[in-house]
Image (spheres, rainbow, N blue to C red):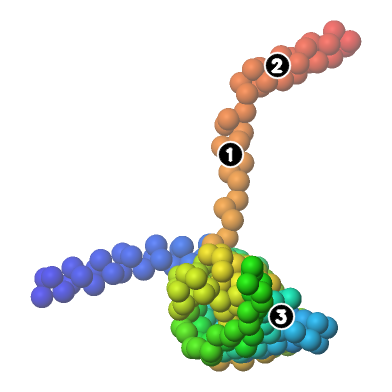
Amino acid sequence: MRRICAYFISILGIIPGTLTQAEGQDTLYIPLKINTGIEIVGPATYFIENKTLSLEGYISMDLNEKMAVALNAGYVNYDFSQYNYTYLNKGFFIRAGTDFNLLKPKKSLGKYWGGIGLRYGLSRYSWEVPEYSQSNYWGKTTSSIAPDKSWGHFLEASPGMRAEIFRNFSVGWSISLRMLLYSGTSSDLKPINMPGFGDATKRFSTGFNYFIVWNIPYKKIRVIVKKPEPEDTEDMEDNEDPNRRQDTGTQGQRQLQQGNTAR
């Protein structure tokens, strides 16, 4: 019984300090959202160049004001031809991970996002070389490589920004920095393109994405933000230069003596 009483007394002692701390803080209500969007750079590039078709969708769910889980998925149809060979590649990819909002709650307000996304990427694709030719001393030979399927793995970091321009409607961009883990093929037959990654003949690749996003609020959370502490004017006065005080006092005495002399 004594322990229980001591426990409640300790709680009562903590409550006033907590209330005092809360009074020195601001409270914000941040909406958490489910965000779905489409990437528009890929279709625009295909419309202009009529070469590589790239389609990508995006969905994320806010866990709190700073973090969200995210999933990107898409399809790529890649066609490349050169003077002595033709390379075809197509397939699907997914990138799953987490988005971190580096903006402070007072800046973001559930409408603005500026941070970085971290993803693990998986690519399932088929590729083939319908025709290639080689010329040597004996003449020109023509051959082909039959279709084959492979799995690719990679990591991605994507810094970017997103802003709500209309109610529950946002636009945003990101820069993709990717590192290849495994292309699914031998070192002699590295894919010229791997869906979701890019040029898999290299260890690293980059990309740029521009998203149109629809935001669906599903919950509001309470976020406490500390107010900036006011400057202590008394301390500033105490820290004032004593020589300056002495000079000010001496000047006042001189003015007083001059007044008495004038009288």
Q: Which residue is mark 2?
A: 247
Residue 113: percent from the left, percent from the top? Answer: 63, 73
C-alpha separation, residue under disc 2 versus residue under disc 1:
20 Å
* SS state under label 1: helix
* SS state under label 2: helix
Q: Amino acid at mark 3?
A: Ser
The residue positioned farthest toward the left in the image shown: 1
Which residue is nearer to you in this view: 34 or 158? 158
C-alpha separation, residue under disc 1 versus residue under disc 3:
77 Å
Number of other residues with Cα within 10 Å of mark 2, as a class: few under 14, some 14 to 19, many 20 or more:
few
Which residue is nearer to you in this view: 59 or 82? 82
The residue positioned farthest toward the top in the image shown: 261
Q: Amino acid at mark 2?
A: Asp
Q: Earlier in the sequence, mark 2 or mark 1?
A: 1
Residue 181: percent from the left, percent from the top? Answer: 45, 70
Q: Amino acid at mark 1?
A: Glu
What residue sits 62% from the left and 28% below the top?
A: 240
Q: 186 left or right of 4?
A: right
Is label 1 in contact with label 3 (beta carbons under 8 Å)?
A: no
Residue 160: percent from the left, percent from the top? Answer: 65, 69
Residue 123 shows in the view: yes
